[in-house]
Structures are given as C-alpha cells and as structure tokens.
Image: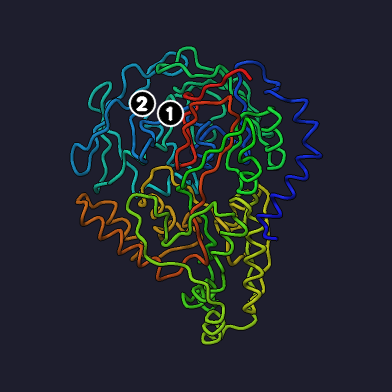
Amino acid sequence: MSRRDLLRAGFATSAGLALGPVLAACAGPTGTSGAGTLTLALNRSLVSLDNKLNQFDAHVTVQRAVRQALTRIGDGLRPEPVLAESFELASPTAWRVRLRPEAVYSDGTPVTVADVATALEMYQQVEASFVGNQFPEWPQVEQVDDQTFDLVTQRPLVGLDALMSNILISPAAANLPEELSDGVGSGPYLVTEANRGTGDYTLRANPDYWGPAPGVERVSIRFLPEETSRVLALRSGEVDVIDSISPDSAEQLDGLPGMNLLQAQGTRLVQLFYNFRKPPEHPLSRPAVRRALSLAIDGPSIVRDVLLDSVTPTDGVVPLSLDGAYEVGSFEFDPRRARQMLDAEGVDDLELTIIWESGEFASDAYVMEAVAQMLGDIGVRAHLRQFEPGGDLPTWRQGRGGDFDIIGNGYGNQTGLALTSLQGLFAGTPEMEATGDAFMGFVYDDIAGGITAAAAETDDERRAVLLEDVQRSIWDLWPAMWAFTQDVLLAHRDTVSGLDLLPINSYDLAAVRLEEG
C-alpha cells in the first residue's frame, strides 16, 4: 500500500473507534469561549502581535486585525489602500500618500504622518529583520500637509506600495523598536487578553473602529502544536478554524460533514538551502557539488508519496506565482549522475548536517527522512537535527549557533512580488553578513547589484529582462538542493463564512462571520 492508502485506512479505523463517541457527544460547536466567539487554532505560537519582530505568514491575519498598514495585499496579489486613501507614484523617486481622514486609533486619536515616519524608523532598528531585509532602501517621509506626505527614495523603488503593506502603524509617542505588547491600534479588534508564553490571545471587536464593523464580536487564538490535536479540536467544535494544515490532515477532513477545506497555490518558498558560510576548501563551496547533491533528490516521489500532491515544484529560485518570477531551471533526479559528478569533484565520504524547525513546512520530518535516505543512496551520510519552534534556530540562521550544511527553510512572501523574495534571499552584502543579516551567508556582489537594478527600473520591459537575468544567475549557483512552493491549506467548520484565503496565507479577519451551530 502507498503512504496515501495507509493514511486513509488508518484514519478510517481510528475514526470509527476513537472518534465515534466524541463526535456523538459533540454534534455541534461546543467551544468554551461563549456565543459570538470565533476560535482559531494556530500551528505556530503567536509570540508577539508586533510583526516587526515576528512575521510568520499565518500570524499576519491576527496581527493586522489589531494594527494596520497603509496598504494590504488583496485579490490578484495587488496592493489595496487601507490607512492610505491614495498611494500614487508622483515622480520616479517619490510616492505620494494621502491618509484617510476617518482613520483613527481605538483611543479616538487620528493616524498621523508622524506615526508613519516613526513606524519606518522602528522597523529599521530591528536586528535581523525579516521585513527590513526586503527593502532595497528605506524611504524617507516628507510631509506635505496634515494628511499628505511623500515617501522619497534615492533611487526609484518599484513596488513600494506593496512593501508598505508590511509596515504596521502605531501612535508615534508609544512606538518602540522593542516589542509592542500593549498600546492602541487602528484595526477592527482590540486585545483584551494576551499570554505570549502559551500563545493564547483574546480579541474583542473595536466599538470605535473607523471602518465596517467586524462580523464576530470576539476572537480566541489558541496555540495547538500537535496537528492531531488541532484536527480533533476542529471536528469536536472546540475550535472553528485551523491553519497551515498538512496534506495528511486535509485527506482526513475532506468530505466529512460540517468540515470545509480551503486551498490555494501559495507564495511561500520551501527549500533545502545550502549554508554559504562554508570555507573555500569545503566541498559545498563549489556549485558543481551543490548541483550533484540536488540530482540525488527524487522530488516527484516526495511530492506524490510524502506531500500527497499538496505542493507545486519550483522551476526557479522563487515561486512562479509571483509577479516577475521566471522559470529558469528545474530540479532533476539522476542519482547515477550525482555520484559521477561527486567523483569527478573528488568528493568522497561526505557527511552533511541538515537542520530545520518543526512545523516549518507540512510533513517536515517525513520529507527530511526521505531526503536522508536518498542522499544515502549516493553514499552521502546525512545527520538530521530538528529544532522546536521558538528555540535557538534563528541564531543558527545568522551563523552564530553552530555549523550546519543544509537548512530546511520556508520563506514567505507577503507582497506578491518576485522582487521581495529576491531581495530578502539573495541580495546579501558584506555589510549585512557582518551582522548575520545576509540569508545563510549568500553574498554575491553581482547578484545583489542585479536585484537592486531591477528594483530601481521603472520601465516594465527593461525590468523584466533584468529580473530574468538575475534569476538565471542565481540558479547557476545552485543555492538550494531542492525546493517547492507549498499550497495554502486551511480547514474550518461550516458555521464559518466570509473567510477568503489569499495565496499569502492570510485573510481579512473582520470579514469572517460565525453562525450558531
């Protein structure tokens, strides 16, 4: 039997025995939070509502319900105005923005130009910032009047309206580069309870929200790390929505009464990325060796048998769903050729340490075990090291935790632009590497220069040529042993409506409605 058949058979047996009494006793929603409460169960602990410090893509839904940005990414992965009434290119190096006059914080004070300027300053002061690394340069705020300002850059910055969707605005007087655990926001919800230790939060509808009233009075956010527990909680009615589910769970829930699945091709790149901080004499410092190892990975089998066709193979260096992405190569499976190439490079008795964080992508442990076996088939020994969420893996990413060879990493994209992923992953500089901010030590001056040039090119045709050229140059370096784009998978009870899941793995929480079960 295939793994898919085994999963189906195993679930059918467990459902008939273990879950039968539970479902009989819980025919309708029985959440303990009370009527009018939507309960979300997250697979990653929401350690902060401040996205300048913590921006795992599934958490953005909650963070942006409390604090808002000038824009957001909507249908078609296009920027839409939120706190900005208008956001238009005034000159090659300046975007003119006008704030909504009705936009106010929960304490009744208006959103001001100074708040935007301070927010940009605070994001710049965050070390190893996920958001900061996606900006080729930081714009300066030049005020025009009480509601209008220009975002000015030294060079043209294409897509700044999309990038600003990641800068959440807070009152200037209370904004800090450290975590904002308290304070007011302009969003449709207020935080009434917060426990960052457990990852549990309670939100209440903001009675003075400047926009349309949210559809649910209360939102309860829970952290349930075990996927089995989240699936059971959804089926019993203890929770209403579970995010970022694996294909195994999707198969279990598909077709069950009262359950709904939402799936979309995502923008999050998952890759087995090489450590580019190796000394020149190390085998992994050679592109030919990196390519040879890639040939050992049977990607189609992993997609079919382990990930159950829930991912899209990546024929390039960024997800092809992004605007400006190009198909510049494909991962092939040829273990015989892999061994021949390693022999030609004089590589024998190679041992690799592969690290990743639990929950970084669906079925991560199964994938890593399969990869280790495939490497073993060409005579390469792989040692697997798994980190728990919230542990010290970030220090390893910065080159301060210890030595490793390959990291299983998911890199989200919240703008819909290929430039954003290219900037964050491949535009590292020596200055960035000095602080550990270059992604896995990937520093190539010509690559960074090509990305910078593309970001500054205002002519669409010329920018397209630059984008394709730089992506081909990156591919030739073989930065990843294997990569794929993970589909966005979410499950909810049929009492939930208005949940419009976007490819960026987020949705407008204020638009969700909850019916009595």
The residue wearing badge 2 is 83
Q: How is the image coloured?
A: rainbow
Q: Which residue is mark 1?
A: 68
Residue 347 appears in view? yes
- Crowding around mark 2 (Cα neighbors within 10 Å: few <14, some 14 to 19, many 20+) is many
The mark that comes first in sequence, 2 or 1, is 1
Q: Which quarter shows the C terminus?
A: top right
Q: Secondary structure at mark 1?
A: loop
Work out which quarter of the rendered image holds the N terminus and state it: bottom right
Q: CA distance from mark 2 to mark 1?
A: 7 Å
Q: Splitting the image into 4 quarters, where does residue 367 fall?
A: bottom right
418 lies above or below 279: above
Q: Quadrant of residue 379?
A: bottom right
* In this view, 199 is above or below 322: above
Q: Which residue is located at x 19 percent, y 36 percent?
A: 90
Amino acid identity at mark 1: Gln
Q: Is residue 70 above or below residue 218?
A: below
- Does the image show residue 66? no
Q: Position of residue 196 (x, y in %)?
A: 64, 33
Position of residue 180 measured from the top left corner of the image (x, y, whole percent): 53, 30
Query: Which numbered circle lies on residue 385?
Result: none
Residue at the (75%, 49%) spot, across then down: 10
Instruction: Say which residue appears at 73% left-offset and 50% top-offset.
Output: 9
Residue 25: % across, % down: 78, 25
Q: Amino acid at mark 2?
A: Leu
Residue 473 or 502: which is nearer the viewer? 502
Secondary element at image label 2: loop
Marks 2 and 1 close (CB-CB < 8 Å):
yes
